[in-house]
Image: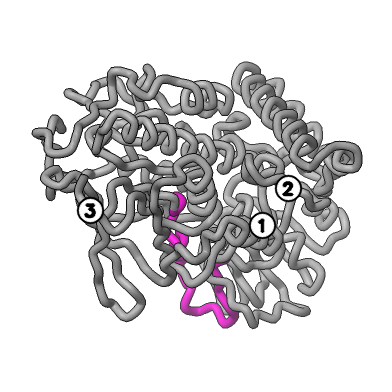
Amino acid sequence: MTQTDTDILIIGAGLSGIGAAVHLTKRCPGKTYRIVEQRGAIGGTWDLFRYPGIRSDSDMHTLGYNFKPWTEAKAIADGPSIRSYVRKTADEHNITEKIQFNTTVIAANWSGDDQCWHVTTQDQSGARETLTCHFLFLCGGYYNYAEGYRPEFPGEASFKGQIIHPQHWPEDLDYTGKKVVVIGSGATAMTLVPSMTDKAAHVTMLQRSPTYVVSRPAVDKLANSLRKFLPASWAYGLIRWRNVLFQQFFFRQTRAHPEKARERLLGMVREELGPDYDVEKHFTPSYNPWEQRLCLVPDSDLFNALKAGTASVVTDHIDRFTETGIKLKSGETLDADIIITATGLNLQYMNGIDVSVNGVKAAPGSLLNYKGVMVSNVPNLAITFGYTNASWTLKADLTSEYVCRLINYMDRAGYASAMPKLDAFPNDTDPFVDFSSGYFQRVMDKFPRQHKEAPWKLHQNYTADMMNLRYGRIDDGVLVFEKEQEESKAPVLQAAE
């Protein structure tokens, strides 16, 4: 087999990348790997975002790794705690020494002649280097770290205060006694609003339309109790499965009976805010539950801030920014010293890398998903993409397990490459993700498609994926394997227009 710099190259040293490295260490001990990380630290998302209150929007018994129990008291954890968890995982498995920090992957080309990837990297000085590997594993998440989604608002230049995007939070920001307006209604906005009320004079969440919001205790009492009587791994496993099964049941029931789910969710909000609050205007979305991701608020912190009067919600459209705040379409004005644009993320597939096969660009929009792990007609490439209706790491762990199974199968059989072969692109395909959220809809044409039948269908179901990825056949009649120096069977990719 062609000599390469490393057997497997992992892109990203966040939650997914460190998890992938641990799985490779445990399951493929004879393989070498290297991690390339564009930032200067471990943690990915949890190192990038530093805004007040940054926390998980999933419980850590499912957002944590399947091999490392979460043992802290809070199940809805803050960013620093999650970052520490990822770093400790890397240190425990001697992964940190294998990470090449401050290095961005620019492009990756699969060469059929030598059956390996040629990966172009760039350091902070602009110097470029080419690394070779047999298998490329993209674990860098699904959004652009360089910039969040930031629409331009009329009159911005006239505003005399500060305008901040949460993805680029200033470390020295002092909002003590300031009037703060947070534009947005997603998880980031609902995290920021209650977290800033301790110092700000008042915090207003300005939204164009409402989102479904669910309160949940930050502390899982049962999990903490079980750890007193059971080994940490047993307690963790029990709570993990309880949460997985409940989430799947809730999701299925919501999709099957949307009106009943809608009534229950809104009823819970009314119980929180009381009969005098205008739940219809501020917390009643126009879409059905789980057509977009639900927002989780721990210990009712958002609702408590609203009841205390330290925060408020305004549902309206922006007309323009003024010198002292925002004028709304209704004619109302919101005074502000600081405006925070929690307007969303810019999504990207394949970590923004220019991927090609034998010099022909593999445009994601012209590819078909394979088992939620690989894509059509691209050899030896896996991409971690977590669930939209559950914790990201549930799928990340299964993806890593499958990649390890695939690599070991190829070694036993003497194969150099594996590729999901697609002879003709089907006519009846669906979007990669069926969410109506704007941040998905803006870029779905730049993501792969999925088919209605396996293995081209993307599941949003942990148990189904577990049976498929952990126990299903590797040689399924769709994957095409090649030994070294065989004439390539790969269909020639069409050049992207």
Can residue 274 be seen here? The reply is: no
Identify the image quadrant of residue 271: top right
Indicate whether 154 appears above or below 143: below
Kindly identify the amino acid type of the residue bearing the numbered disc 2: Trp
Name the residue carrying label 1.
85
Residue at position x 11%, y 45% in the image: 113
Rendered location of residue 337, percent (x, y)? 66, 77
Q: Is residue 94 left or right of residue 298?
A: left
As helix, strand or loop, the secondary structure at mark 1 comes to helix
Residue at position x 76%, y 27% in the image: 264
Rendered location of residue 331, percent (x, y)? 61, 60
As helix, strand or loop, the secondary structure at mark 3 comes to loop
**Real-space CA distance between mark 3 and mark 2, rounded to the nearest whole angstrom:** 39 Å
Seen from the viewer's position, the closer of residues 144 and 238 is: 238
Indicate whether 168 appears above or below 475: below
Q: Which mark sits nearer the N-terminus, 1 or 2?
A: 2
Identify the image quadrant of residue 222: top right
- Nearer to us of marks 1 and 3 is 3
Indicate whether 430 appears above or below 98: above
Seen from the viewer's position, the closer of residues 353 and 96 is: 96
Q: Which mark is residue 70?
A: 2
Q: Quadrant of the N terminus?
A: top left
The stretch of residues the image draws in magenta is 140-166
The furthest residue to the left: 487
Q: Is residue 404 left or right of residue 84?
A: left
Name the residue carrying label 3.
3
Q: Is residue 151 left or right of residue 123?
A: right
- Nearer to us of marks 3 and 2 is 3
Rendered location of residue 50, percent (x, y)? 62, 68
Q: Residues within 10 Å of mark 3 (few under 14, many from 20)?
A: few
Kindly identify the amino acid type of the residue bearing the numbered disc 3: Gln
Label 1 close to label 2 by CB (< 8 Å)? yes
